Amino acid sequence: MGAKPTDAAPAFFSAEAIGGAFRAALVAAGLAFPILALRAEPDLNNQLVLLNRWPLLLWAAGIVFVGHLAAQIPHVGRILKWALFAGCTLVLVWILAGVANSNLPLRGKIALFTLIAASGFFGLLIAAPCAPGTPFHDFQKRARAFAGKIVGPIGIVALFAFPLVMLWTLGPGGSLKWINNYGVQILIYVMLGWGLNIVVGLAGLLDLGYVAFYAVGAYAYALLSTHFGLSFWLCLPLAGILAAFWGIILGFPVLRLRGDYLAIVTLAFGEIIRLVLINWTDVTNGNAGLSSIPRITFFGLPFTAADNGFAASFGLEFSPIHRNIFLFYLILCLALLTNVATLRLRRLPIGRAWEALREDEIACRSLGINTTSTKLTAFALGAMFGGFAGSFFAVRQGFVNPDSFTFLESATILAVVVLGGMGSQIGVALAAAAMIGGTEILRELDLLKAIFGPDFDPAQYRMLIFGFAMVAMMIWKPRGLVSSREPSIFLKTRKSVSASHVREGHG
Amino acid sequence: MSEPLLTVRGVETWYGNIVALKGVDLDVREGEIVTLIGANGAGKSTMMMTICGAPRARSGSIRFAGLEISQMPTHEIARLRIAQSPEGRRIFPRMTVYENLQMGAAIDKFAHFDDDLERMFTLFPRLKDRARQRGGTLSGGEQQMLAIARALMSRPRLLLLDEPSLGLAPIIVRQIFQIIRELNHREGLTVFLVEQNAFHALRLAHRGYVMVNGLITMSGSGEDLLARPEVRAAYLEGGH
């Protein structure tokens, strides 16, 4: 453009700025007119009538007008950053106040308070915006590097301690929600994300039908355990093998495809599996699904109140939380297994071949790498971990039906991988925690009800918020949450590759 | 004389219904540097890629060390130790230099990796300085060196080089050609070189072929071709 930065943006509140904002508002009004201003509703005679909602349209246009004008304020980026910082502090204080006011036992309050305050404090300290060159910035830099080094081990220790700490602070009744809704739910997606990461992040094969393997694993466990009475530990590898087999079945026809074409075929594959599950009623019982799948046992001891149950055998008072804690540790171990396997594979020739394949298929072939088998192993291994997760899903729910394996699931898993930064293990875990945990938190935000009225159900706006988050990510962190790439091998010291050298949408 | 290392006879290659090679014959003997020169679009790179099996030759025969390779898949041809530094270099941009070189040794299951790495770093000291840097951040000349080094990591019996001088400063071109000459001289490396830069290529090579529109029109020793007026007129005028 060649314009000087000083005259690139019109002066704040100049006629030009107001005119620009007005035009933007007009465009917004035009776009929003059919969506917001008109609404068809059945009247008392069950006939559709068109209702006007002009105020809504005015609000939308007004917001765009003010927003457009606000964007002209000098240093708006920095102001926003500080506002975000202040907002985070407020939320932290609000959570702490909530903890203080809750009816938890005192030890629970103290433990939670310390945990939240400490993590919040250090989080804000590290994330606080701060001009480069100042001593605090240097400190931040070192703190960030240190945090990057210890986040893995500390995270694993924290995860293993999590259910016990929850049980101790909140008691069996109160901790169920945290262990089950948050812990297990998030870890399932962490595992799925890590599994898909092998296919998408490492081998660079965009797979939109990953949920198919999840479904194969779930149905494999459901069918094998109900029909043949096989135990979970026997079914788990079988489900993995079956899913891997289907991964290869999918792999063969799509070997020649890449990019968009591959994505479409995998999408279709996911749908085919789901439709087969719906229509092959003799085996899968169709939409009704398979129920009364045997529940998990503690290596043979059932989690029941009976005399031969887990609680009685260990002299504990029976509580349903025991099973949930066991499930938590089970999925945690499965997820860690996925992670360890991926990290090991990345250092082996096959892992290197995946990464090379993602970069340049032709060069790979000219170096003597069999791209066919390389792709198929990526599909098979990714699918296998999906199958493991699927059979965990089945043993946890005790019931499977095709509704759990829609395209939306595939999209969520893929979003976890993309948001996390493709190829980054820790990023995928963080993204899963943010997305799945965020959805759960939304259900509980009574604060929003106080603002928007008692009928407001924040969970309904999940997709909207999710969409905003995606757009924001693509603008500010287009390469994902954790976008730097660790070289798989290094000469003397490990030195990560900075985000700006990692291509968008790749590891 | 025994059979040449590489024998190409009557090879035709098509892209869909467009013919790119119209029956090419050429030989590369053990320990030779052979160059293929020609104008843009003559089919030089296609010839090289056809040796590697991508695209496959529609007819004709390509024999390497007594083996018919024209119908083999690319990765198996590579495993016969035909290494390639392809057109446009095709290094792995997001992998480090070290990782790139490792990919080159994949055929060998890394049996001689450490020795070969040392050798490459002696041949191309620049790469040693950049070992931990990502391939995509190297300069053009360094990328070309990396592509050649990666190909050499597999201890090739035949090295295929496609336009190593493309887009490089003359001093770097001379450097790279000097290294090829040394490798040939010292280790008897057999090289098949496709080049636009006819002057440099013919001075380096023992023998040369000239390709026009998918056909070999002339062949002879390097000096012989350099001296021919047709070659001078078509490929060398304009000064060097």
Image (cartoon, coloured by chain):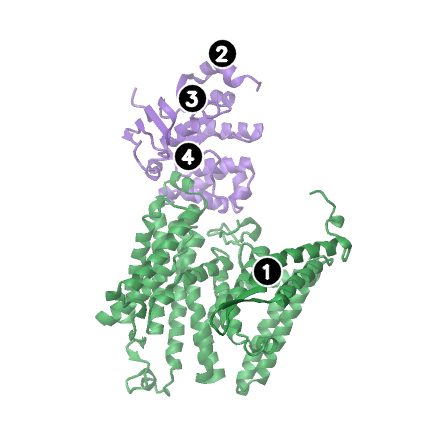
Chain colours: A green, B purple
Cα–Cα span, label 2 and label 3: 19 Å
Label 2 crowding class (10 Å Cα cut-off): few <14, some 14-19, many 20+? few
Mark 2 or mark 1: which is in front? 1
Residue sitting at x 46%, y 69%: A156
Mark 2 or mark 3: which is in front? 3
Residue tagged 4: B84
Whether residues under marks 2 and 1 lie with C-beta atoms below 8 angstroms apart, the answer is no
Question: At which x and y percent is residue A367?
Answer: 39, 40
* Residue A130 at least partly seen: no
Label 3 crowding class (10 Å Cα cut-off): few <14, some 14-19, many 20+? some
Residue tagged 1: A33
Q: Chain of mark 1?
A: A
Q: Disc 1 residue type?
A: Phe
Cα–Cα span, label 4 and label 1: 60 Å
Q: Chain of mark 2?
A: B
Cα–Cα span, label 4 and label 2: 32 Å
Check disc 1 and report its element: helix, strand or loop.
helix
Mark 3 or mark 4: which is in front? 3
Q: Is residue A143 above or below residue A108?
A: above
Label 1 crowding class (10 Å Cα cut-off): few <14, some 14-19, many 20+? some
Q: Are marks 4 and 2 on the same chain?
A: yes
Check disc 4 and report its element: helix, strand or loop.
strand
